[in-house]
Image (cartoon, rainbow, N blue to C red):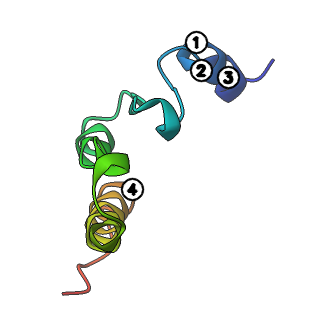
Amino acid sequence: MTEPDQQADQQGERGATAESGTIPVTGQPAVDHALTALQGLESEPLTDHHDRLAAVHEELHAALNPDQPDAG
């Protein structure tokens, strides 16, 4: 088994689906912080989803691409 596969197996119980209302824990603080903004999304009106998802996308992009300048 490769290292990413082993990590996925170890996180399997923590890394639940969005349908269960549990946000996965990655162990990367910036990513985990961004993902917490998804908490409770399923109970929000659909009209609010775009703005919240767009904000999470921007935060994840910044966390995963620290060498790229901000688009704003």
Q: Mark 1 or mark 4: name the one nearer the start of the chain.
A: 1
Q: Earlier in the sequence, mark 3 or mark 4?
A: 3
Q: Amino acid at mark 3?
A: Glu
Q: Quadrant of the N terminus?
A: top right
Pointer 3: residues within 10 angstroms few (<14), some, or many (20+)?
Answer: few
Distance between the Cα atoms at labels 2 and 1? 5 Å
User: Disc 4 marks which amino acid?
Assistant: Leu
* Residue wearing tag 2: 7
Element type at mark 1? helix
Which residue is identified by label 4?
64
Marks 3 and 2, how far apart at CA: 6 Å
Quick one: SS at disc 3?
Answer: helix
At x 27%, y 64%, the residue is 52
Badge 4 element: helix
Residue at 54 percent of width and 14 percent of height:
13
| Mark 4 closeness class: few <14, some 14–19, many ≥20 residues within 10 Å | few
Q: Are marks 2 and 4 in contact (CB under 8 Å)?
A: no
Residue 10 is marked as 1
| Foreground pick, 34 / 3 | 34
**Numbered badge on residue 3:** 3
Which residue type does callout 2 highlight? Answer: Gln
Query: Quick check: 59 above or below 20?
Result: below
In this view, 52 is above or below 15: below
Question: Which of 21/58 is in front?
Answer: 21
Q: Residue furthest right?
A: 1
Q: Residue at coordinates 30% horizontally, 61% vertically from top-left?
A: 66
In terms of image quadrants, where is residue 56? bottom left
Type of the residue with mark 1: Gln
Q: Position of residue 39 (x, y in %)?
A: 28, 41
Separation of disc 3 and disc 4 at Cα? 19 Å
